[in-house]
Structure formats: structure tokens, C-alpha cells
Image: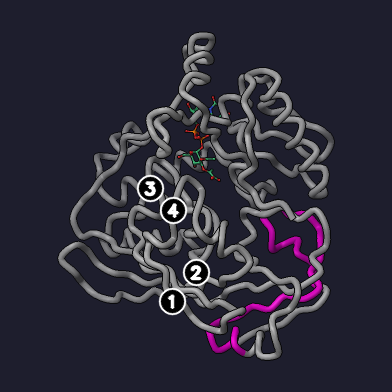
Amino acid sequence: MKREFYNLSLRERNSFHVEQRAERLVEFDSEADLREIFAHGVPERWMVLSGGNNILFTQDYRGLLLTPVARNIELLGEEAQGVLVRAEAGLEWDDLVAWAVEHDLWGLENLSLIPGKVGAAPVQNIGAYGAEAKDCLQEVACYLPEEGVVRTFTARECRFGYRESIFKQELKGRAIILHVTFRLSRTARPNIGYGDVQREVEARGGATLKNIREAICAIRRSKLPDTSLLGNAGSFFKNPVVERSKAEALKSKYPEMPTYPSAEGPERVKLAAGWLIDRAGMKGYREGRVGVHDRQALVLVNHGGATGSEVIALARKVQQQVKETFGVEIDTEVNIL
Ligand code: EPU
């Protein structure tokens, strides 16, 4: 069943809580709803607004926003390599992780508490604590309004990268994700090598699924602000990937600077944008109603009543400061509209 709204405030539908309005927003439940919505053609301007956790509105949206609300989880079957689980796009991501942990299924636990919905997970290949959605994602089913068909993309066809996928490239503005299938494991596969995870897991008595989930939740709660209390969109910037020579030059000047291998190959190195912003002196910096979070410099926050343009102005300042200090460009991770 679909629900339709006109001239709707988006304040509670974006995690930055900026006050912008949408000309039209439809909550949809199924492919049939989408067929009905597009029965008279594809409007000039439309996009999917899922949980609104990775978006910054800087103006009212003149067009059609589509929000998925179906939230079933279905166990499709057991295979030698794992258990196939299909979740609908409107389910809260963390409800899926909680469900998997309760059912003793491994694979999603490191991605506990990431805000957002299941349908948004493949778009930017959400990741945290040494895991990414792509690691156990099997396929993604989408409705393509231009073609009027549902198409299923295998994980390989999704062309996942660090915070990247086909849904941010060729399929941007062309696909509406309906459901996502994951292959989870009944065999224990702890992945606790990242940062403080091992210590937090051991403090809870060892690497059980439940302990890993609790450890990840505790780490996230200690660093990342709760969007219901302080508007934000998680990491505002992506970690930059630079030439190895550039990373080495910086490392000789700042030996304590964290570096990570890049999936792009041995000649490229990933740096920590949070560290760069912090060391550029911007952590906790505040300008009127917006600021850089004081416990995680990658996160920009709305202290209350800020507009999208105020957030952008701060983001530009942070980028400039990092560029001047380290000669490194950092790109935004959040979609700016
Ligand atoms: N650091 C600082 N100061 C800061 C923030 C970080 O010195 O203010 C240092 C940390 O001490 C650490 C390094 O920078 O040595 C990396 O920090 P952290 O492990 O906290 O992770 P991150 O690279 O800042 C990424 C993801 C997060 C994810 C964490 C944990 C991106 C853009 N962000 O952050 O994802 O939760 O790793 O895996 O890749 C998100 O995408 O919204 C998000 C929160």
C-alpha cells in the first residue's frame, strides 16, 4: 500500500534534521506500487529517499521522492556455502543485523548499528570495522522505471568498491532497490582485527556473535553522535586514497599518521580523513549552528536549526584546512542536493 504526501517537511526524514520540503513524496511497499506510480510516465525529477542518513538537503526538493517501507526478512534456503537471506529495502539495517545475530548467522555483525535501511546498504557499500556489505552480499533486485522492469544484479555486477557501486555510477537515478540477498554463515567467522574491536570483544568474554555485536555497538556509541540528539550523517568525508610517494612523504613528517592498504593496488595508500582533520586543528571546531564533532572529526554536526548551506560552508572550510596543512584533498561522502 502506498502513501502519498505533498509539500512535506523533510526535517524528520533526514538525519541532519535540516528543514527543507519535498514537492511530493510517496512511500511504496512493492513493485506493484512502483508500477502504479510510474504508470503515466517517469517524472522529470525523482529519486529515492531512504532513511535520509547520507544526504544533505541545501534546498527544497522539486520533484518526486520515493521511500521504501517494506521490511520483511525471508530465509531463502541453506546451501553448502551459507544461508541465503533476503531483506526488503525498507527494513532498518540494524534490525537485519540484530536478526542475523539472534539466528546465529555470521557475516553482518561488524556492521552493527550503522544507521540507514537495507536498500541503501549496497548503494555506497556500507562498511565499518574491517567489513563491508559486499563481503556477504549475493544480489540486489531493482525496479528500473525507464524500462518498466525488475532486474537483479549479482554482487559482481554491482561493481563494489570503497563506498562505491554501480548504483552511484551508471544506475544513479535509474534504479529503485526492492530487496537485497545476503549469504550468511552458520560457521563462526570472527573478524575482530580492526582498531579497538579485539579488546572490546575480549572484555566481554570472547568472540561470540553476541559479544562482537555488543562490542561494535559500544565503540560506535562512544564515538559517533546519536542522530536523534545531534543531527549528522556519519562520516561526512571519505578517507582519501593517495599515491604511495605522497603517503611516504607525509609519514616521514608525521610518523604517527595512520595508513591503510588500498583496494586500488600497491601504489595507492588510504589515509584517515578523521586523523587529517583532527591534526589540522578542526576537531570540535564550531561555527554558529554547525560544527566538527568533538569525538570523531569525520562527522559534521547540526547543533540545532542549521541549514544545509551552513553545513556546506563548514565542509569547504575543513577541506581547505586539510589541503593547506597536508596537501591532500578530501571528498565528501554524503550526497549533497
Ligand atoms: N582519528 C583521529 N581523530 C579523529 C578521528 C579519527 O585521530 O577525530 C584516527 C583514529 O584514531 C584512527 C584513524 O583516524 O587511527 C581512523 O579512525 P576510525 O577508525 O575511527 O575510522 P575512520 O576511518 O575515521 C571509517 C568509516 C566509518 C566507520 C569507521 C570504523 C569512512 C569514511 N568512515 O572511519 O564509517 O564506522 O571507519 O570502521 O570510511 C560512515 O561511513 O558514516 C562511518 C561512520
Residue 280: within the magenta? no
Mark 4: amino acid: Phe
Residue on which disc 3 sits: 110
Q: Nearer the viewer, residue 293 or 317?
A: 317
| SS class, disc 4 | loop
Residue at 61% across, 39% down: 237
Scheme by which the image is coloured: one colour
Mark 3: amino acid: Asn
Residue at 42% across, 34% down: 262
Residue on which disc 4 sits: 160
The answer to whether residue 196 shows anywhere in this view is no
**Left or right of 26 in this view: 197:** left
The image quadrant of residue 323 is: top right
> Which quadrant of the rendered structure holds the N terminus?
bottom right
In the rendered structure, which segment of residues is drawn in magenta?
8-35
Mark 2: amino acid: Leu
Q: Are marks 2 and 4 in contact (CB under 8 Å)?
A: no
Q: Earlier in the sequence, mark 2 or mark 3?
A: 2
Residue on which disc 2 sits: 91
Mark 1: amino acid: Asn
Q: Earlier in the sequence, mark 2 or mark 1?
A: 1
Local crowd size for mark 3, using a 10 Å CA cut-off: few (<14), some (14–19), many (≥20): many
Q: Earlier in the sequence, mark 1 or mark 3?
A: 1
Residue on which disc 1 sits: 72
Residue at 26% across, 45% down: 190
Local crowd size for mark 1, using a 10 Å CA cut-off: few (<14), some (14–19), many (≥20): few
In the rendered image, residue 129, in percent from the top left (x then y), is placed at 41, 41
Mark 2 against mark 4, which lies toward the viewer? 4
